[in-house]
Image (cartoon, helix red, strand yellow):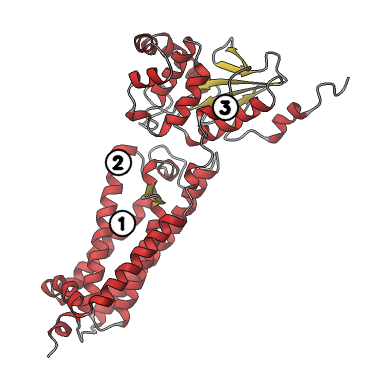
Amino acid sequence: MDKTGDISQSTSSAPGRKGIWWAMLVLSLAGLLVSVVLAYIHFKANTQAGFHSFCGRGSTFNCDSVARSPYSVLLGVPTALWGIFGYLLAVVVTVWGLRTRRTVLTAACGLHLFVAFAALSAVLGAISAFRLHALCILCAATYGINLLLLVLVLVQAAGVGFPQVGAAPWHLLRESPGKTLAVFLLLGAMALGLVALVPPYWRRGTSPGRKAFALEGLSRGEAPGGGHWIGAREPVVTITEFSDYECPFCRQAHAQLRNIVAQFPDRVRLIHRHFPLDQACNRSIERPFHQTACRAALIAECAGRAGRFWEANDYLFDASGFLDTQSDEKIAADLKLDPAALDRCMKGEGAAAVKNDVEVGIALKLEGTPSFLVDGQVYRGNLPAAVLEPLRARPDAGK
């Protein structure tokens, strides 16, 4: 008698067992659908400034802020795409469970898969609760789906016997080592293909580097009401940006605006003002969000006191992804600043200047960054093309 067949096969076809597999298939398809929606939200949230999903408008419950966090990407692939991959695999396993009589083996595969799902859900849920302080409702839906899948597969495994289920993978490896290895190699190749083929769209639009923006020859100064300006002394268009060094779309706007200044240095003036989405210095922010943004704004403001605001501006947008790992002393050295003077300024006049910018932003009822003020009109996310049209008009037009 083939003992392996005894372990990995079962002639049981009880309707109750089929019902459990059907339930797991429905849950897997539901998880697949939710993951597709999450992948769409992740793409839009990281490529379209001002995007708001149907579950991204609250403060605590916000899918969009979670999608823009660095924890939304795992091994270079959006977590939502890993979800699609995992739920497709779950669909294959559950369909196999419905069609085969090898219930011990399918229960073993399902058990290992859904234990991994539940463990990942626990980790991501903890990150949302304790690190991001924001909850994605759709993500929470997948956590619930994964928990139900785990409960159902445990019921299935209990019905056919936990000892047999635990031993099934080892018996299969001894019985068909070639086929088992081929399956794992195929899954590994598919995962590597996902890593290789998915473009890092969440990094697009970031500043190409502080050395890419020439500062020589550009006029600069401090605006009377606050903020630092660069560009034209007698501007045709003045753009005031309210920005956050930790905001990915602010990095995108930074690159676009600096290119506009470089193109029209005698016709446009860019004024930078701080509106960090960080409760440490912004009273309109009710929960921890961009937790290095206030510190970055203070550093920039104090660099401005030493005549190096725009050098610091470029540097801080470049460093936004790892600013929390850099000490003030290291940043001061990079920016050629006196560390002691920087420290004093950050506790004094720098903090006052940042607070002034924040209060102006609150008075303008800003809801996010980047936001722009042109001729008294506030624009959020993007500047309309019509705002920049005067820059392209000939200086002597209308004379």
Local packing at callout 1 (Cα closer than 10 Å; few below 14, some 14-19, many 20+) is some
- 3D distance between C-alphas at marks 3 and 1: 48 Å
Q: Decide: marks 3, 1 in contact (CB < 8 A)?
A: no
* Amino acid type assigned to the residue bearing label 2 in the image: Ala
Real-space Cα separation, disc 1 to disc 2, in angstroms: 15 Å
User: Residue 316: x, y in percent?
Assistant: 45, 26
Q: Specify the quadrant of the image occupied by residue 36.
A: bottom left
Image position of 241 (left or right of 61): right
What residue sits 49% from the left and 53% below the top? Answer: 40
Q: Which mark is residue 213?
A: 3
- Could you say where residue 183 lies in the image, as x and y percent from the top left? 31, 72
Residue in front for this viewpoint, 43 or 29: 43
Name the front one of labels 3 and 2.
3
Dot placed on the residue nearer the N-terminal end, 1 or 2: 2
Q: Nearer the viewer, mark 3 or mark 1?
A: 3
**Picture residue at 35% right of the left edge, 13% below the top:** 339
Residue at the limit of the structure toward the right, as seen here? 399
Label 1 SS: helix
Quarter of the picture holding the C terminus? top right
Residue 27 seen in the figure: no
* Residue sitting nearer the eye, 216 or 391: 216
* Label 3 or label 2, whichever comes before in sequence order: 2
Label 3 neighbour load within 10 Å: few <14, some 14-19, many 20+ = some
Mark 2, other Cα within 10 Å: few <14 / some 14–19 / many ≥20: few
Vertical order, 53 against 340 (above or below): below
SS under mark 3: loop
Q: Using the image, determine if residue 10 lies above or below residue 195.
A: below
Which residue bears the numbered disc 2?
Answer: 129
Amino acid tagged 1: Gly
Circles 1 and 2: CB distance less than 8 Å? no
Residue position for label 1: 144
